[in-house]
Image (cartoon, grey):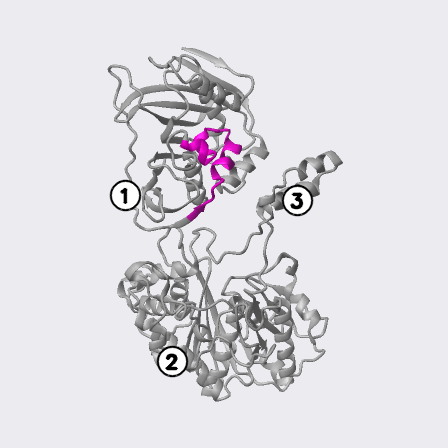
C-alpha cells in the first residue's frame, strides 16, 4: 500500500450536448450516450486501445438489463476491452460521487488513471411491468406442474397490462422534487424575481461560454446537437415573468418551468489520473480533487428540505480543510431549481440555521455572486441526473486552470433522497 | 364468563352473510363471553401480502398492527352471535388502541382471546369496545381495543359516555402525500378478511350511506405505522381516532411530529384538509 496519499489530477472532460426530453436524443439509450461520450474522451486524449485503471459511471433511471451499463459501454467504446468498470448510483450526486471514488483510488495508489461519468435519459426511460402482473408472472415462472402453471396464469387480469411508468416523485413522500423544493422556497421566502434573475444569468453565462469557445474542448456534438438544447441565449426576465408557476400553491407559488431544470437526456465523463500518469502521457493537469464530503437530511419526518443536504456537507468539508466559505474563486452550486441555490446560500448566511442546524458559532456567510456558476449551470444546460457531476467537474477544472495556479473551487450538488455531495477542486 | 376455544379461524364470508341476515331485532347488554384460539401460527404468505398492502417491510417480526388480523375474525364471530346487542353491518370503527409489549416474532405460536366491553352512549348512537389480548408462552405480548360506533343505536340506561377522541399537536407540516387507489379496500379486505361491504365497491358502500367505497381504518393505521418503519419504539402504544372516512380513490397527506420519544400523526385529505386519522404513538 502507498505510504502516503496523493491528490488526484483532473486531466479533462467530455460530454455530449444535453438534449431536452423527447428531443434530439429521444431514440438514444443510456448505453448509446455513455459510449459516445467515452469515445469523445478517448479521441480527445488519445486513449484509443488503451487501458485506463477503471471506468466508474452510473445512471439514475436505469433498466434492470443495464446492470453492467458502464462495463458494456466500455466494451462498445474504443478503450481497451481490458478496462474494468463498475456502476454507481447516488441520484443526482452520481457523477460527482463516481469522480470521488476514482480520485480516492488514485489517491491511495490503487489506480494511476480512471474515468468517472454519468448518463441519463428521461426519453428512453425504463418502464416496469404492472406490479400485480409481475408477481403473477413470477408465480407462473416458479410453477412446477402444468396445473400450478394454469392456476398461476388464472391470476392475470386485463387491468394488469397497464405498465408502471416511473414517477418523478420521492418514494417515501409521494411529492415531486419540485413540490419539495417549493416547500423549501416558501420556508426560506425565496422570491419569484430572484429565481428568474438567477435563471437568466445561467442562460447568459452558458451562452457566453459557448460563444467564446470555452466548451470547444469539453463538448462533442452528438446526433445533430452542438449546444445544449435547453439553452436560451435570449432568455429575459420579461419572458420568464410570463410563465405560470408549476410547483407550490397559492401566493407562495414561485417556481416555473423556467426557473426549474427541465427533464433532460445526456452524458458526461471526466478523466482523472495521478500527476505522473498525466506527465507520462503528455497530458495536462487542469486541477486536483482536494477533498469531498456527503451529507443527508431527514426530509420525511425531520422537517428539513429535501435538497438542503449540501448546506450540511459544506461546513464539514470546510472545517476539515481549514477553509472558510469565502476562500474560493469559483462556486459551482448545482441549479436543480433556482430556489434551491438561493435557499442554500440563504441558509449559510442565516445565524439561526448555522447555529441550530449546523452547530456553528457564526454563520458561514455570503458567497460573492460574481463567482457563482460563472459558465452557466443546470437551469440553462439541463440536468440529465447522473451526467451533471461530470459536467460541473470538467467545467470547474477548466475554469480553475484558466485562472492560473492556486485557485480554488467549491462544488455543491443536491440529490434525491435528501442527500448532498460536495467537493473542493484546486488548480 | 364463558370462554370458547375455537380450533380454526371462523369463515369470514359466512359470518358477514349471517351478520347481515340477523341484523334486526338486536339489543340489550353485552354478553359475557370470550372467544379464543390457542397456538396460532402466522402464515408467511399472508404476512407478506399484508405487509405489501400496507407498505410494511417484510421482516421476521410482525408489524405492530398485524395481530389485529388474528383477533378480528374472532371479534366478528363474537359480534355475529345472537346475544350481541348491536348489528354488525354498518358498524363504524372510530378508535383503535394497540399496545405492543415487545416485538413479536413471525414464527411465535400465539394465543388470541377476544371479548366485548364498555357499551357506551355516543351523540350519534352507541359505541362498543372489542378487545383482544395476544399471548406468547403464557405472557401477554399485545393487546388492543377497537371502538365501534353503531349509528342510531341506543346504549342501555346508565351506560358511560363514549370516549373516542385522541388529542394531538398542530401537525401542520406535511411529511408525505399518498395517492390511495380505488381498489385499496378490496386489497385490504383480501389480506385481512374484513369484507365489510362499505370498503369493497361504490355500490355496496352507497347502501350504507357512503358516496364511494371507504378505506379500512386499520389500513390507514397500518400505512401510517409503515411510514415510520425503523423509527418506532419496540414496546409501543398506538392510539388512533378514525375521524371522517377516507373515500376511495383519494389523495391524502401524512403529518408526523416527534413527541415524548414517539410521534403524533395525522392523515388528512390533501385538498380539503379533512381529518381521516389522528393518532399518538408512545413508548410503553
Q: Are marks 1 and 2 on the same chain?
A: no
- Give the position of the N terminus of chain A as an image quadrant: bottom right
CA gap, disc 2 and disc 3 = 55 Å
State the separation of the CA atoms marked 1 and 2: 45 Å
Q: Which residue is mark 2?
A: A371
Tell me the residue that label 1 is attached to.
Answer: B169
Residue B60 % position (x, y): 55, 37
Badge 2: chain ID: A
Is A253 in front, or is A58? A253
Q: Nearer the viewer, mark 2 or mark 3?
A: 3
Disc 1/disc 3 C-alpha distance (Å): 46 Å
Q: In the rendered image, is residue B149 in sight?
A: yes
Relative to A262, is A340 on the left or the right? left
Q: In the drawing, what numbered circle is on residue A137?
A: 3
Q: At 51% across and 66% down in the image, what residue appears? A: A385
Q: From this view, report whether residue A353 is shown above or below residue A76.
A: above
Amino acid at each position: 500500500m502507498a505510504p502516503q496519499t496523493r491528490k488526484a489530477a483532473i486531466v479533462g472532460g467530455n460530454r455530449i450536448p444535453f438534449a431536452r426530453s423527447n428531443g434530439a436524443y429521444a431514440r438514444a439509450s443510456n448505453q448509446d450516450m455513455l459510449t459516445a461520450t467515452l469515445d469523445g474522451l478517448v479521441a480527445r486524449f488519445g486513449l484509443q486501445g488503451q487501458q485506463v485503471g477503471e471506468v466508474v459511471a452510473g445512471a439514475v433511471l436505469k433498466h434492470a438489463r443495464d446492470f453492467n451499463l458502464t462495463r458494456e459501454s466500455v466494451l462498445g467504446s474504443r478503450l481497451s476491452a481490458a478496462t474494468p468498470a463498475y456502476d454507481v448510483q447516488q441520484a443526482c450526486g452520481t457523477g460527482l460521487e463516481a469522480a470521488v471514488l476514482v480520485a480516492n483510488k488514485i489517491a491511495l495508489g490503487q489506480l494511476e488513471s480512471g474515468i468517472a461519468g454519468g448518463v441519463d435519459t428521461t426519453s428512453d426511460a425504463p418502464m416496469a411491468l404492472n406490479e400485480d402482473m409481475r408477481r403473477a408472472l413470477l408465480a407462473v415462472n416458479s410453477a412446477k406442474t402444468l396445473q400450478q402453471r394454469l392456476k398461476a396464469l388464472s391470476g392475470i387480469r386485463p387491468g394488469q397490462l397497464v405498465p408502471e411508468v416511473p414517477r418523478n416523485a420521492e418514494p417515501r413522500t409521494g411529492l415531486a422534487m419540485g413540490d419539495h423544493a417549493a416547500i423549501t422556497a416558501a420556508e426560506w421566502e425565496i422570491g419569484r424575481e430572484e429565481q428568474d434573475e438567477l435563471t437568466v444569468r445561467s442562460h447568459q453565462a452558458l451562452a457566453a461560454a459557448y460563444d467564446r469557445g470555452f466548451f470547444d474542448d469539453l463538448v462533442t456534438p452528438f446526433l445533430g446537437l452542438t449546444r445544449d438544447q435547453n439553452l436560451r441565449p435570449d432568455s429575459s426576465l420579461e419572458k420568464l415573468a410570463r410563465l405560470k408557476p408549476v410547483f407550490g400553491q397559492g401566493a407562495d407559488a414561485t417556481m416555473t418551468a423556467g426557473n426549474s431544470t427541465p427533464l433532460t437526456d445526456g452524458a458526461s465523463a471526466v478523466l482523472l489520473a495521478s500527476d505522473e500518469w498525466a506527465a507520462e502521457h503528455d497530458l495536462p493537469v487542469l486541477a486536483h480533487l482536494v477533498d469531498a464530503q456527503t451529507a443527508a437530511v431527514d426530509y420525511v419526518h425531520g422537517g428539513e428540505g429535501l435538497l438542503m443536504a449540501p448546506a450540511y456537507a459544506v461546513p464539514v468539508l470546510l472545517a476539515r480543510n481549514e477553509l472558510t466559505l469565502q476562500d474560493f474563486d469559483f462556486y459551482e452550486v448545482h441549479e436543480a431549481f433556482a430556489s434551491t441555490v438561493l435557499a442554500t446560500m440563504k441558509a449559510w448566511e442565516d445565524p439561526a440555521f448555522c447555529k441550530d442546524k449546523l452547530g456553528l458559532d457564526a454563520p458561514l456567510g455570503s458567497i460573492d455572486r460574481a463567482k457563482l456558476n460563472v459558465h452557466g449551470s443546470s437551469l440553462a444546460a439541463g440536468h440529465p441526473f447522473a451526467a451533471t457531476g461530470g459536467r460541473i467537474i470538467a467545467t470547474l477544472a477548466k475554469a480553475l486552470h484558466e485562472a492560473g495556479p492556486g485557485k480554488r473551487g467549491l462544488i455543491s450538488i443536491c440529490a434525491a433522497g435528501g442527500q448532498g455531495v460536495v467537493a473542493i477542486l484546486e488548480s | 364468563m364463558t370462554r370458547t376455544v375455537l380450533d380454526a379461524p371462523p369463515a369470514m364470508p359466512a359470518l358477514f352473510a349471517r351478520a347481515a341476515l340477523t341484523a334486526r331485532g338486536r339489543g340489550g347488554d353485552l354478553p359475557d363471553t370470550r372467544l379464543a384460539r390457542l397456538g396460532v401460527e402466522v402464515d408467511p404468505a399472508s404476512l407478506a401480502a399484508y405487509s405489501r398492502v400496507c407498505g410494511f417491510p417484510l421482516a421476521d417480526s410482525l408489524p405492530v398492527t398485524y395481530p389485529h388480523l388474528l383477533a378480528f375474525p374472532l371479534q366478528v364471530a363474537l359480534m355475529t352471535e345472537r346475544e350481541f346487542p348491536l348489528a354488525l353491518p354498518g358498524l363504524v370503527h372510530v378508535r383503535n388502541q394497540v399496545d405492543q409489549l415487545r416485538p413479536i416474532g413471525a414464527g411465535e405460536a400465539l394465543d388470541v382471546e377476544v371479548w366485548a366491553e364498555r357499551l357506551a352512549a355516543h351523540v350519534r348512537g352507541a359505541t362498543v369496545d372489542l378487545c383482544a389480548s395476544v399471548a406468547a408462552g403464557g405472557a401477554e405480548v399485545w393487546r388492543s381495543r377497537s371502538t365501534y360506533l353503531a349509528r342510531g343505536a341506543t346504549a342501555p340506561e346508565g351506560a358511560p359516555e363514549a370516549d373516542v377522541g385522541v388529542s394531538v399537536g398542530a401537525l401542520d407540516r406535511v411529511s408525505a402525500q399518498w395517492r390511495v387507489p380505488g381498489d385499496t379496500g378490496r386489497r385490504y379486505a383480501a389480506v385481512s378478511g374484513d369484507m365489510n361491504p362499505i370498503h369493497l365497491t361504490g355500490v355496496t358502500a352507497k347502501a350504507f350511506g357512503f358516496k364511494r367505497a371507504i378505506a379500512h381504518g386499520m389500513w390507514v393505521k397500518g400505512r401510517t405505522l409503515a411510514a415510520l418503519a425503523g423509527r418506532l419504539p419496540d414496546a409501543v402504544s398506538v392510539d388512533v381516532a378514525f375521524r371522517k372516512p377516507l373515500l376511495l380513490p383519494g389523495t391524502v397527506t401524512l403529518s408526523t411530529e416527534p413527541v415524548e420519544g414517539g410521534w403524533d400523526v395525522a392523515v388528512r385529505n390533501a385538498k380539503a384538509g379533512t381529518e381521516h386519522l389522528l393518532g399518538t404513538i408512545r413508548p410503553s
